[in-house]
Image (cartoon, rainbow, N blue to C red):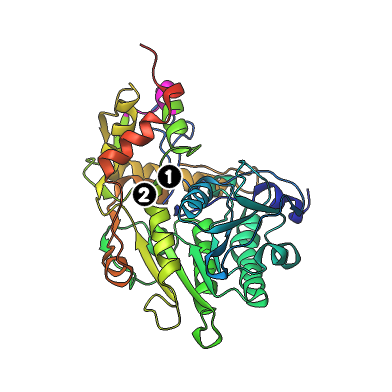
Amino acid sequence: MGSKGQIKSFFSGLAASPIQECCFFQISCSPLNKLLSKTVFGLIMSNTGNRHKRCRALPTSSTSKKCTVIGGSGFLGQHLVEHLVEKGYSVTVFDIRKSFENDKVQFFLGDLCSKEDLLPALQGVTMVFHCASPAPSSNNRELFYKVNYLGTKAVVEACKEAGVQKLVLTSSASVVFEGTDIKDGTEDLPYAKKPIDYYTETKILQEKEVLSANDPARNFCTVAIRPHGIFGPRDPQLVPILVQAARSGKMKFIIGDGKNLVDFTFVENVVHGHILAAEQLRRDSPLCGKAFHITNDEPVPFWEFLSRILMGLGYEAPKYHIPYWLAYCLALLLSLVVMLLRPLVALSPTFTPMRVALAGTFHFYSCERAKRDMGYKPLVGLKEAVAKTVESYPHLRRAA
């Protein structure tokens, strides 16, 4: 398959990001399968789609209430579209596939990296939300670069050509994470010089591209939203992967003492942050050209959060501890073995030092800038968010 075909097959959805965006990852690499748990951190994407195509025509509304969601068929994108419609916006979705039906939404299908495909979806639009990104689990370096960086360059160029006034990017708090503790980290932290993976490296390039394009003098303002550990109903990865791991006996171990605090962010709060940013982004706004952390503002022990999800669905929580230093050393050893075998065989282990760090270190972020500059406050607390998420997966509940 050519590179353009790959982009069409994988582009869509989110991030922050992932939670980008922080994303769920899996620790399941032979011969360590029986020793270590399977965990995740993930930006969620849609996968396949059709060529550029206009799906339906809708009556127009006032220009200030017209917006386009790029990646609107993905996990975060769908939630964002629904909330925008509820708030009275005229919404257009640009994606590679149409994953839901909504008579109030206009769909355009196309290739993110094609400005010609993008332009029809941006006509008469004042604000654009860019929450499309390939799934980190695809492990396709070429795809990451093409979509996250080159695709975003195409989005910026198309927005300027179409006269869009506001561009809101879904970035990731992980753009500053290098595998060591971050406690109450602010947006002033420098970009990671050694990102946790190549996907995050391209997210850094993406954020820089969008923020550097900020040009209030020419009525084009940009902002980046950095969520961390997005979860919620209809997330096709976090809960299903956790349940799969629990059913196969791979959710028994905790890396470290289990006290490391991490941000997990309910999808409705991420959506709320995006809409606040878009509505307050203007020439004289302190949001212009800046990045903002958006989280639940309730750091929680990493393993406790996973346990809440599992126990809510009737599964046992992990209870056996593996010292962090031991897990990290094993991951380093495995990385060395992979490097030595690389001339003979191509291996892509998921059990890496950086992913051990994601599960065993502190990484939570301050939302003070978002509170101050856009009046952000989480709409749904963590306890309620976990309950809503668990309730949305009755088919994954453990049989009595």
* Quarter of the view holding residue 161: bottom right
Residue that mark 1 sits on? 41
Q: Quadrant of the C terminus?
A: top left
The segment highlighted magenta reads 245-252
Mark 2 surroundings: few (<14), some (14-19) or many (≥20) residues within 10 A: many
> The disc labelled 2 sits on which kind of residue?
Leu
* Quarter of the view holding residue 176: bottom left
Specify whether 7 is left or right of 87: right
Specify whether 179 is left or right of 224: left
Decide which of tag 2 and tag 1 comes sooner along the chain. Answer: 1
Q: CA distance from mark 2 to mark 1?
A: 9 Å
- Residue 45 percent across, percent down from the top left: 56, 46
Q: Residue at x 39, y 56 (%)?
A: 272
Decide which of 163, 22 is in the foreground and name it. Answer: 163
Q: Is residue 193 visible?
A: no
- Residue 92 percent across, percent down from the top left: 61, 57
Secondary structure under badge 1? loop
Furthest residue in direction top, as rendered: 400
Furthest residue in direction bottom, as rendered: 217
> The disc labelled 1 sits on which kind of residue?
Phe
- Residue 29 percent across, percent down from the top left: 48, 35
**The magenta stretch spans residue 273:** no
Q: Which disc number belongs to residue 358?
A: 2
Secondary structure under badge 2? helix
**Nearest to viewer (mark 2 / mark 1):** 1
Are the residues flagged by discs 2 and 1 in contact, CB closer than 8 Å?
Answer: yes
Q: Residue at x 29, y 69 (%)?
A: 369
Q: Residue at x 52, y 72 (%)?
A: 166
Decide which of 178, 261 is in the foreground and name it. Answer: 261
Specify whether 206 is left or right of 259: right
- Residue 156 percent across, percent down from the top left: 61, 72
Q: Which disc number belongs to residue 357?
A: none
